[in-house]
Amino acid sequence: MRLEPPPRRRRLVSLTPLIDVVFILLVFFMIASSFVEWQAFSVSAPGRDKASEQEEEDPLRLHVEQQGYRIGDAALTAAELDERLRAVHAEDAERRLHLLVGAGVPVRRVVQALDAASAAGLSRVAVRRGEAE
């Protein structure tokens, strides 16, 4: 009588441990990587109190529109805006600037105005929705 060994079964390779290792490596590299700084400029929302609003002088109102910038009735280009904001800072370093953004204005134009204010040295800047005049 001849005994034959049982037929060998072919083992299936499980991909589950490999997927686990790849996932762990992915998580490790996501945590260990340094990303671009998301915060380009700081924005703080000050508290409102009546006393500080009454003491405060009239802020400079810069209208940001689709066509460009406007202070009062004077339309300004980007270069003129830089000069004007530097002059305002030279007069009064603590002067407030309100950016009044009109409807449909691209964010790029608002950021350019914020950059101009920052370059001029103005630190008290508020961004608001444009008002109808």
Image (spheres, helix red, strand yellow):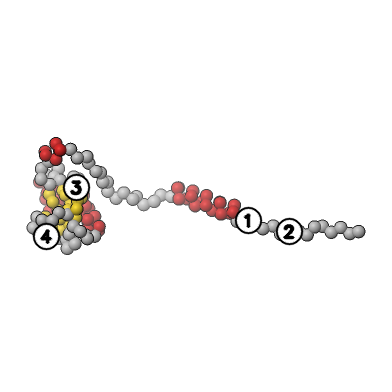
Picture disc at residue 125: 3
Q: CA distance from mark 4 to mark 2?
A: 84 Å
- Mark positioned earlier in the residue sequence (3 or 2): 2
For the residues carrying marks 3 and 2, which lies nearer the camera in this image?
A: 2
Q: At 13% across and 51% down in the image, what residue appears?
A: 61
- Secondary structure beneath dot 2 equals loop
Q: Can residue 38 be seen at all in this image of the molecule? A: yes
Dot 4 amino acid type = Ala
Q: CA distance from mark 2 to mark 1?
A: 15 Å
For label 1, the residue is 14
Q: At 52% across and 49% down in the image, what residue appears?
A: 24
> As displayed, is residue 75 above or below residue 87?
below
Q: Position of residue 59 (x, y in %)?
A: 12, 47
Residue 80, by quadrant, is: bottom left
For label 2, the residue is 9
Q: At 76% across and 58% down in the image, what residue appears?
A: 8
Q: CA distance from mark 3 to mark 1?
A: 60 Å
Dot 3 amino acid type = Val
